[in-house]
Image (cartoon, grey):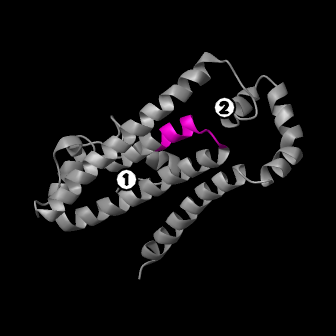
């Protein structure tokens, strides 16, 4: 069994356990300890104009801000979450119906423009969750999720190139990896220190 196949299931379990742990921590007596110990740090962050947004955005249950930009972001969160999940479900329906009906590679719908629209949908949904429920741990998990999806997408593309050869390479050249204007995922490759092919 390859390292990849052993690592991904374990990383997925840890990812979701950390999300669950955040919820448990916020509803237990541990919160009293957390805010008693870290309250001075949070107060210092709040006192300085350059860092006050951190507590206003990532810890909204501690402070209240009437800032219209932060309020707009809170309203935008559920919209992005719903849109992202919708994209994911529609694209998952395309992929799994093609597998069931043995139609081959899906290249219609969003797949004619983006090679990994399911991951894009989950990224949009994750951004919506981060805006709706802003927590530092959600930010860290969101960035980790983007990194894992990038690696997973590269792995899938390697398998598709091995299976379909030049036809898949032509498809890669005419579609974006995740974002418009990023056919090879140059932004993600730069962020995560990888190169295309």
In this rendering, position of residue 43 left or right of residue 139: right
> Are the residues tagged 2 and 1 within 8 Å (C-beta)?
no
Q: Is residue 37 above or below residue 49?
A: below
Q: Quadrant of the N terminus?
A: bottom left
Q: Is residue 3 above or below residue 174?
A: below
- Residue placed farthest to the bottom in the image? 1
- Span highlighted in magenta in the image: 126-135
Picture coordinates of residue 138, whole percent (x, y): 60, 47
Q: Residues within 10 Å of mark 2 (few under 14, many from 20)?
A: many
Residue 165 image-quadrant placement: bottom left
Q: Which residue is mark 1?
A: 196
Picture coordinates of residue 66, whole percent (x, y): 67, 18
Q: Residues within 10 Å of mark 1 (few under 14, many from 20)?
A: few
Residue beneath the point at 22% across and 56% down: 95
Picture coordinates of residue 15, whole percent (x, y): 55, 60
Say if the magenta span includes residue 1.
no
| Foreground label between 2 and 1 | 2
Q: Which residue is mark 2?
A: 57
In this rendering, position of residue 61 left or right of residue 188: right
Q: CA distance from mark 2 to mark 1?
A: 35 Å
Q: Quadrant of the C terminus?
A: bottom left
Residue 74 visible: yes
Q: Nearer the viewer, residue 140 or 135?
A: 135
In this rendering, position of residue 112 left or right of residue 197: left
Residue beneath the point at 37% across and 44% down: 85
Badge 2 element: helix
Q: Is residue 44 above or below residue 142?
A: above
Instruction: Give the mark nearest the N terminus, 2 or 1.
Output: 2
Say if the magenta span includes residue 128.
yes
Q: Nearer the viewer, residue 193 or 188?
A: 188
Q: Is residue 186 above or below residue 14?
A: above
Majority SS type along the magenta span: helix
């Amino acid at each position: 069994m390859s390292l990849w196949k052993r690592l991904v299931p374990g990383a997925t379990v840890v990812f979701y356990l950390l999300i669950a742990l955040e919820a448990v921590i916020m509803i237990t007596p541990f919160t009293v300890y957390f805010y008693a110990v870290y309250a001075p740090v949070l107060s210092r962050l709040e006192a300085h104009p350059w860092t006050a947004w951190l507590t206003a955005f990532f810890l909204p249950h501690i402070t209240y801000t009437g800032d219209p930009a932060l309020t707009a972001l809170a309203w935008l969160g559920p919209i992005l979450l719903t849109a992202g999940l919708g994209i994911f479900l529609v694209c998952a329906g395309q992929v799994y119906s093609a597998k069931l009906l043995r139609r081959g590679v899906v290249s219609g719908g969003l797949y004619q423009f983006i090679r990994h629209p399911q991951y894009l949908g989950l990224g949009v949904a994750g951004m919506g969750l981060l805006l709706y429920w802003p927590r530092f741990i959600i930010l860290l998990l969101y960035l980790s999720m983007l990194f894992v999806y990038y690696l997973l997408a590269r792995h899938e593309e390697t398998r598709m190139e091995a299976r379909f050869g030049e036809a898949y390479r032509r498809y890669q050249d005419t579609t974006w990896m995740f974002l418009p204007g990023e056919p090879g995922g140059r932004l993600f490759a730069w962020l995560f220190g990888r190169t295309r092919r």
